[in-house]
Image (spheres, helix red, strand yellow):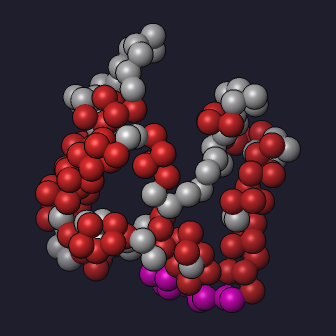
């Protein structure tokens, strides 16, 4: 069901999408991640990069990626890369149409609708803004009960923050 999406004209809420039988539902994402955790020879054989960690410590996390790839860590390059990739800079670049040669997937569908930009809130835990408290509790309970702990996204682990 990887490409089983709602019809273009369907009016499906984000919550219903996540709980539905659509490709990319929360169940699909959890199952996919669990396959990585269970089927990989060792979870240490791949580099786990979490958005929360990258937002909190961009240079440190980029240094870990570079080292994982077996390359030399260059602090000056890391600083430049972190500055270029900062939310504020990418937001500005997107509004200036800097990425026009990258195709329509990297451009806002509607420049008057901030939700169509690729660089939006950049908020850790921002998913909570789209659901009421009961829905958040249900979604987080699914993660707590189904996602293997290797990824650090359970309530006991602080939902991966920091």
**Which quadrant of the view contains residue 48?**
bottom left
Magenta stretch bounds: 63-75
Relative horizontal placement of residue 41, taking residue 111 as reference (left or right):
left
Q: Residue at 76% x, 46% y: name it.
A: 94
49 relative to 105, above or below: below
> Which residue is farthest top?
9
- Residue 60: x and y in percent read 56, 84
Lateral position of residue 7 relative to residue 93, left or right: left
Q: Residue at x 15, y 55 (%)?
A: 146
In this rendered view, identify the residue nearer to me: 126 or 101: 126
* Residue 87 sits above or below residue 43 on the image: above
Question: Is residue 91 inside the magenta stretch?
Answer: no
Is residue 112 positioned above or below 93 on the image? above
Q: Residue furthest right?
A: 96
Tell me where residue 117 sits by quadrant.
top right
Quadrant of the frame with the C terminus: bottom left
- Which residue is more in the foreground, 45 or 149? 149
Q: At 52% across and 78% down in the image, what residue appears?
A: 61
User: Is the N terminus in the top left, top right, bottom left or bottom right quadrant?
Assistant: top left
Q: How many marks?
A: 0
Q: Position of residue 16 (x, y in %)?
A: 31, 29
Q: Is residue 157 above or below residue 16?
A: below
- Image quadrant assignment for residue 84: bottom right
Q: Judge whether residue 5 can be spotted in this image.
A: yes
Judge whether residue 67 is colored magenta: yes
Residue 134, position as x, y percentages in the image? 28, 43
The answer to whether residue 2 is seen in the rendering is no
Q: Position of residue 32 (x, y in %)?
A: 24, 51
């Amino acid at each position: 069901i990887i490409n089983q999406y709602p019809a273009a004209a369907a009016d499906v809420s984000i919550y219903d999408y996540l709980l539905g039988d659509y490709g990319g539902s929360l169940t699909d994402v959890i199952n996919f991640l669990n396959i990585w955790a269970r089927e990989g020879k060792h979870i240490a054989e791949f580099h786990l990069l979490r958005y929360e960690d990258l937002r909190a410590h961009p240079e440190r996390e980029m240094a870990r990626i570079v080292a994982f790839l077996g390359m030399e860590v260059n602090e000056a390059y890391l600083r430049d890369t972190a500055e270029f990739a900062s939310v504020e800079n990418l937001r500005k670049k997107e509004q200036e149409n800097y990425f026009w040669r990258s195709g329509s997937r990297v451009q806002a569908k509607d420049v008057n609708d901030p939700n169509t930009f690729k660089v939006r809130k950049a908020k850790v835990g921002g998913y909570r803004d789209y659901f009421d408290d009961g829905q958040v509790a249900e979604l987080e309970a699914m993660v707590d009960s189904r996602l293997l702990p290797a990824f650090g996204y359970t309530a006991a682990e602080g939902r991966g923050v920091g």
